[in-house]
Image (spheres, helix red, strand yellow):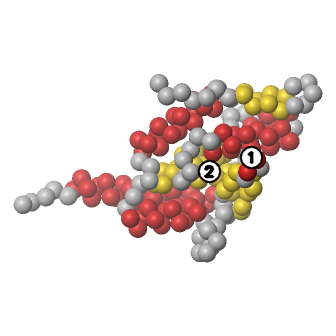
Amino acid sequence: MIEDTSDRKTTERELEKERNFISAVLNVAGALVIVLAPGGRIVRFNHACETTTGYTFGEVEVGRARRYGRPLSLIMFDIDHFKTINDTYGHLFGDFVLKSIASLVKGNIRNADFLERWGEEEFMVLAPETSLEEARAMAEKLRVLFRGVLFREDRHHNRKLRSNPFRKR
């Protein structure tokens, strides 16, 4: 029996290119992994490392994806007009917005996914075992979720976040 493996080889090459891209982004990013502690408190670790090996979580996941030939997706997004938020309401409110966005994202991704902050208002979600189609669906879910978010400060400087829950149609 003769088997045509050209499609499989093409797919494997494409997966390897995607893994290399994700690896390069994670190496350049110097990202902070945002971990939500009980009570919603955010703890940040520079180049968050897996304690026994010293590798960053991203490096571990890229290595795992390479070794086992598994999908690994990276979703990147930023907060529109973040400089205007900081300039208009101040950096404390800007920090509140960042923490609220991180909390919102963490509540809408899987436990196996990693949320990393990259730059001032850019974030990345590293999603192991996630195909391109699944990553697109996850990104769309987050986009719709963010569309329903409104940040405001009332006249007593109370910070509020309002969100419309994501509903699958």
Q: Amino acid at mark 2?
A: Leu
Work out how far the residue at label 2 is from the one at label 1, CA to CA, in angstroms.
15 Å
Label pair 2/1, CB-CB below 8 angstroms: no
State the SS at label 1. helix
Position of 131 with respect to 165 (left or right) is: left
Q: Quadrant of the N terminus?
A: bottom left
Which SS class for mark 2? strand
User: Based on the displayed image, in which of its 4 quarters is residue 147 positioned?
Assistant: top right
**Picture layout, residue 153 above or below residue 4:** above
Q: Residue at x 68, y 44 (%)?
A: 102
In this picture, residue 13 sits left or right of residue 153: left
Q: x and y percent of residue 85 in the render?
A: 79, 34
Above/below status of 50 relative to 121: below
Q: Which mark is residue 115?
A: 2
Give the amino acid at mark 1: Gly
The residue that appears at 87% across and 25% down in the rendered structure is: 154
Residue beneath label 1, please?
40
101 up-or-down from 158: above or below: below
